[in-house]
């Protein structure tokens, strides 16, 4: 069942192992993270060593090998956001949600908070992306309200 | 026939075949440049950076590693400048900080005049030379192990840090590791490489008894070279 | 509608003529900026409101609604520009839409509250008269305001794809390379290498298979110009690559886009499809002997992949590990084949050089840096956004004339150019003319064009720590100096920020910087120490204050600051309620007190206090 989903993605990318990063993006979209079983199957399908898949999956920041929460929240830590107080926001969010300052899942698995390095919306800093939606000129208070919605 | 070319090293003309790696040429000409991650059996990876030299380029000097630098005619190199000496020392300080207990690192550091490091010491036996990964890929051809993560968190590991399924237990990684970080143990007809979470059954010689090699490795060789099923039933010594 | 393939110069000309003929130059057009910034400010709702209102009023035939890419003035979004008059409205909300249509579109009346107000409190009518735009020279970026990025017809109608037939059918490869060389165009991704010279090297390689790569992995925190060009005008990139294809003899290109830029991926995908339909991608393009197609690859979030050799590895399905150059990609790149990698903005310049000529391009800019450059002007500045200016403009003009000065009239402290591995320049460098070489001389660099403005509340040691921590985490970890060196530099900087620095630390940092710069494999390590070196050079006093006096002059390093309640406190208890560590105590209507043992310097109380009763020292 899960393997079939992986197969479909691999077919879409024409079994091209050069598209590994794009394939992993798609796999993660389906499973919300990268399960080991899916990656093992993927390696066989693409006929590349598991070590290569594992290396790429752990190298790039976009990928998570652990299950993630229902809502994905990105806190931009780019320079423009940094000088406008992104660190404060991250600290407050971490404290309020009881997660590490580097980011993580909330206990109820409602949220996964991840730090990202610049999302390219620098004029709006500090920026939070909540389930893909951009929120600009954020303050700690405005951010915490997002979580309560 | 490859073309013979001339390069200049520390003011001295050196003749060599075009396209050779600089470090190899220097060694052959008895010009000492320290190196740590270099090994004849794998393609130069150029990561420890201890073998840096200066190359003249458009009137300036550029610092480059020599192990993976293919030479071309007329190039001018310097191997002993004050700058290089200083930078190699700092590199050794950095390596000492990471692998403060590794004998090979301590020895090379001393040879380059570094007794102590200014930085907080850790005792990681792995110096991240990558030789194990490269040997597994290029020499053995199985790519059972690889790198994980990036930056300061980078390490060598089996995929998912669980049993390396593709590992045939050949031990190439163990033999090539310059700091003896990767351990291997053969006991009770089982070969263990704990770093890759591998335990493999050994095959015994049918006629004299002792272990020959892991069954998986022998099977790998048999399939690769298309040898008969019973080829490894006996060890080399017991063969007619 | 299935479009017909254009198989000659003549057919493209006719196609364009038909498009232009069908368009009335006096047509009322409501332009809504659909860039990422304006989307975050809610422009999608504004677009919907315009659609509904135009339908309701039966104006859909008379008034065109155009959703474009980024206009650059992100600070004031959502932006609406009404053409042909170029009336500029800012911060437009869906509720404003009926009034805009009724008053402005139908009756030509202005709505003052949506207009831009100058420093003299006078309202400014037209887009081009707003100081933010007036000093810019928007040769590349200007198109964004006139085309729907999802429409190839819009691009063709404004003269797009007119350099293409010229290059493909009238010019030889040598002539194209010669033009690009003569223009003096240098790579906009940061390297600053002469684009034409790179093409020439690649074209001279005997290998028949060559590749083209567009580097759209804009990882520099604080820079988003490539995103906006790719989102807003993707065809200009395609046209640039097509011209290069002829010049070097390549038939396939890869665009490596950050996955964080979904709109860019979408718009580029649509653009490629449309170009294929018209036969501008595919076999025998416009009847020439050039075959060309493009594949889009998404990145996975790694700053190092902006480095070209790392990017190439990543394009082959591997991790972004760079290798030492030489060999350069122009000689041995993707799959070992000669490869030209240029960044988005560089590609966007190419069609202009071919259609307007190298002399036109070379007339803009300084002696060794030609053309314009897009900068992302962000941080503690009034007019944040993307600005395109001729090379050679001074930092002061950019910051004060275009950027409108520092936020809340605070004092300018530094401007950081060139991304995380650029440098921080102090006030005395504000009259520096911005070009590749001047910035490098001053200890910074052009990079891809980020400009982050800082005021007195930014601690320069903390900033250096921020950059080194960033780069430490983004290092691929392959080579010792970058992996271990940045780790140790980060340790030292963190120590200094915590008040535990020693006098020797500054020298150690400088020593290490040289080694990390020289001995690292790629430009990430090769430039990583820049923020440290430039802050030591220009703001050494701040380092010394941290080390000697245990003081953070900007009051940001937590271990070195103390919060205290002053006599302005009215005893409102707001801070008591919000303090996460219950460090604040006090009765209603009496001056409160902070328990320093419990205080974690989070600053929540300062945010909450309406009376400025909390001092930071």
Image (spheres, rainbow, N blue to C red):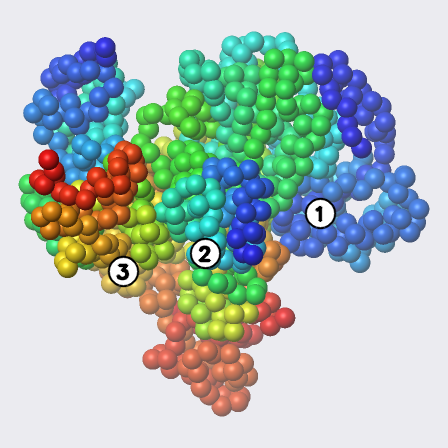
The residue under label 1 is C79
Name the residue furthest bottom.
Answer: C587
Q: Report whether C445 appears left or right of C532.
A: right
Res. B107 visible in picture? yes
Q: Nearer the viewer, residue B215 or C507?
A: B215
Q: Cα distance, mark 3 to mark 1? A: 45 Å
Question: Which of pointers 3 and 1 lies earlier in the amino acid sequence?
Answer: 1
Q: Nearer the viewer, mark 1 or mark 2?
A: 2
What residue is at 24 percent from the left and 56 percent from the top? B199
Residue C520: tell me if it is visible.
Answer: no
Question: Taking C445 as reference, is B145 above or below it?
Answer: below
For the residue pair B200 and C242, the one nearer the viewer reads as B200
**The image quarter in which residue C551 lies:** bottom left
Q: Is residue C102 left or right of residue B228?
A: right
Query: Image point 70% across, 44% down: which residue?
Result: C33
Q: CA distance from mark 3 to mark 2?
A: 43 Å
**Which mark, by number, is residue C495?**
3
Q: How far is disc 1 from disc 2 in space, using C-alphas?
A: 48 Å
- Number of numbered markers: 3
Q: Is residue C72 left or right of residue C420?
A: right
For the point 67% across and 23% down, the residue is: C280
Q: In the rendered image of this protein, does residue C416 appear above or below residue A108?
A: above
Residue B232 pos. (x, y %): 20, 42
Q: Residues within 10 Å of mark 1 (few under 14, many from 20)?
A: many
Does mark 2 fall on the same chain as mark 1? Answer: no
In the image, taking residue C226 as reference, residue B169 lies left or right, namely: left
Q: Position of residue C282 (x, y in %)?
A: 63, 23
Residue A79, given in percent of the width and then of the height, sits at: 46, 51
Labels 3 and 1 in the same subunit: yes
Q: Label 2 belongs to which residue?
A: A37
Crowdedness near tag 3: few (<14), some (14–19) or many (≥20) residues, C-alpha within 10 Å? some
């Amino acid at each position: 069942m899960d393997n079939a989903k992986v197969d479909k993605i691999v077919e879409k990318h024409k079994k091209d192992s050069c598209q590994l990063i794009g394939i992993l993006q798609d796999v993660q979209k389906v499973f919300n993270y990268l399960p080991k079983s899916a990656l093992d199957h993927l390696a066989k399908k693409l006929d590349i060593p598991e070590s290569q898949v594992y290396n790429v999956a752990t190298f790039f920041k976009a990928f998570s090998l652990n299950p993630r929460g229902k809502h994905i929240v990105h806190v931009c830590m780019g320079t423009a956001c940094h000088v406008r107080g992104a660190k404060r926001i991250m600290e407050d969010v971490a404290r309020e949600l009881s997660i590490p300052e580097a980011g993580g899942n909330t206990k109820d698995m409602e949220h996964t908070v991840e730090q990202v390095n610049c999302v390219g919306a620098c004029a709006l800093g500090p920026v939070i992306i909540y389930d893909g939606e951009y929120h600009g000129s954020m303050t700690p208070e405005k951010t915490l309200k997002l979580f309560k919605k | 026939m490859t073309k013979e070319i001339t390069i200049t090293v520390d003011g001295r003309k050196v003749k060599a075949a075009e396209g050779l790696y600089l470090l190899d040429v220097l060694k052959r000409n008895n010009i000492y440049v320290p190196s740590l991650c270099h090994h004849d059996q794998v393609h130069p990876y150029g990561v420890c950076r201890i073998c840096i030299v200066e190359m003249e380029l458009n009137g300036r000097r550029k610092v480059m590693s020599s192990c993976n630098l293919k030479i071309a005619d007329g190039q001018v190199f310097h191997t002993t400048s004050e700058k290089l000496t200083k930078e190699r020392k700092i590199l050794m300080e950095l390596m000492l900080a990471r692998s403060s207990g590794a004998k090979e690192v301590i020895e090379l550091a001393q040879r380059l005049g570094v007794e102590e490091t200014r930085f907080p010491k850790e005792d990681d036996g792995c110096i991240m030379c990558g030789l194990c990964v490269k040997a597994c890929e290029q020499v053995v051809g199985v790519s059972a192990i690889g790198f994980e993560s990036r930056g300061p968190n980078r390490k060598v590991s089996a995929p998912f840090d669980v049993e390396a399924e593709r590992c045939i237990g050949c031990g190439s990684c163990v033999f090539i590791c310059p700091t003896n970080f990767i351990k291997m143990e053969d006991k009770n007809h089982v070969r263990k490489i704990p770093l890759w979470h591998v335990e493999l059954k050994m095959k015994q010689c049918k006629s004299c008894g002792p272990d020959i090699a892991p069954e998986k490795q022998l099977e790998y060789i048999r399939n690769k070279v298309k040898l008969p099923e019973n080829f490894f039933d006996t060890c080399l010594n017991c063969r007619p | 509608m299935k479009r017909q393939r254009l198989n000659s110069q003549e057919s493209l000309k006719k196609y364009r003529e038909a498009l232009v003929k069908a368009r009335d130059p006096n047509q009322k057009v409501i332009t809504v900026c659909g860039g990422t910034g304006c989307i975050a400010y809610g422009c999608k709702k504004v677009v919907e409101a315009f659609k509904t209102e135009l339908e309701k009023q039966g104006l859909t035939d008379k008034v065109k609604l155009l959703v474009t890419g980024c206009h650059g003035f992100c600070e004031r979004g959502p932006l609406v520009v009404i053409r042909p008059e170029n009336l500029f409205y800012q911060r437009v909300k869906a509720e404003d839409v009926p009034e805009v249509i009724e008053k402005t579109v139908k009756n030509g009346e202005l709505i003052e509250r949506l207009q831009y107000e100058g420093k003299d409190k006078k309202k400014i009518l037209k887009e081009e008269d707003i100081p933010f735009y007036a000093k810019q020279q928007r040769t590349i970026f200007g198109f964004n305001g006139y085309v729907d990025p999802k429409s190839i017809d819009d691009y063709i109608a404004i003269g797009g794809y007119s350099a293409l037939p010229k290059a493909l059918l009238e010019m030889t490869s040598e002539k194209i390379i010669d033009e690009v060389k003569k223009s003096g165009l240098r790579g906009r991704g940061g390297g600053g290498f002469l684009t034409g010279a790179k093409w020439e090297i690649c074209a001279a390689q005997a290998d028949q298979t060559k590749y083209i790569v567009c580097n759209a992995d804009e990882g520099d925190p604080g820079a988003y110009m490539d995103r906006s060009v790719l989102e807003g005008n993707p065809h200009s990139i395609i046209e640039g690559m097509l011209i290069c294809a002829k010049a070097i003899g390549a038939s396939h290109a890869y665009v490596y886009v950050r996955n964080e830029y979904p709109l860019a991926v979408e718009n580029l995908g649509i653009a490629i499809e449309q170009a294929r339909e018209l036969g501008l991608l595919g076999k025998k393009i416009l009847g020439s002997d050039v075959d060309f197609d493009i594949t889009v690859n998404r990145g996975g979030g790694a700053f190092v992949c902006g480095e070209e050799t790392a990017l190439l590895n990543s394009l082959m399905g591997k991790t972004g590990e760079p290798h030492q150059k030489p060999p350069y990609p122009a000689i041995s790149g993707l799959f070992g084949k000669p490869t030209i990698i240029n960044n988005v903005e560089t590609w966007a310049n190419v069609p202009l050089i071919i259609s307007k000529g190298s002399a036109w391009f070379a007339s803009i800019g300084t002696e060794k840096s030609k053309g314009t450059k897009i900068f992302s002007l962000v941080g503690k500045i009034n007019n944040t956004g993307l600005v395109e200016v001729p090379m050679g403009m001074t930092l002061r003009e950019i910051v004060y004339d275009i950027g409108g000065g520092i936020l809340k009239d605070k004092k300018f402290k530094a401007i950081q150019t060139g991304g995380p591995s650029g440098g921080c320049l102090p006030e005395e460098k504000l009259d520096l003319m911005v070009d590749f070489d001047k910035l490098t001389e001053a200890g910074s660099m052009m990079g891809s064009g980020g400009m982050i403005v800082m005021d007195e509340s930014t601690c320069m040691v903390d900033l250096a720590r921020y950059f080194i921590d960033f780069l430490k985490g983004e290092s691929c970890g392959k080579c010792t100096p970058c992996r271990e060196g940045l780790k140790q530099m980060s340790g030292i900087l963190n120590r200094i920020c915590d008040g535990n620095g020693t006098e020797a630390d500054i020298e150690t940092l400088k020593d290490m910087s040289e080694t990390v710069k020289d001995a690292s494999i790629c430009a990430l390590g090769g430039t990583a120490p820049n923020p440290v070196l430039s802050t030591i050079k220009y703001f050494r006093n701040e380092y010394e204050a941290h080390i000697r006096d245990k003081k953070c002059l900007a009051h940001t390093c937590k271990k070195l600051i103390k919060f205290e309640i002053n006599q302005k406190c009215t005893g409102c208890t707001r801070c008591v309620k919000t303090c996460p560590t219950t460090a604040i105590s006090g009765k209603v209507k009496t001056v409160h007190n902070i328990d320093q043992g419990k205080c974690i310097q989070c600053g929540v109380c300062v945010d909450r206090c309406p009376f400025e009763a909390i001092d930071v020292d």
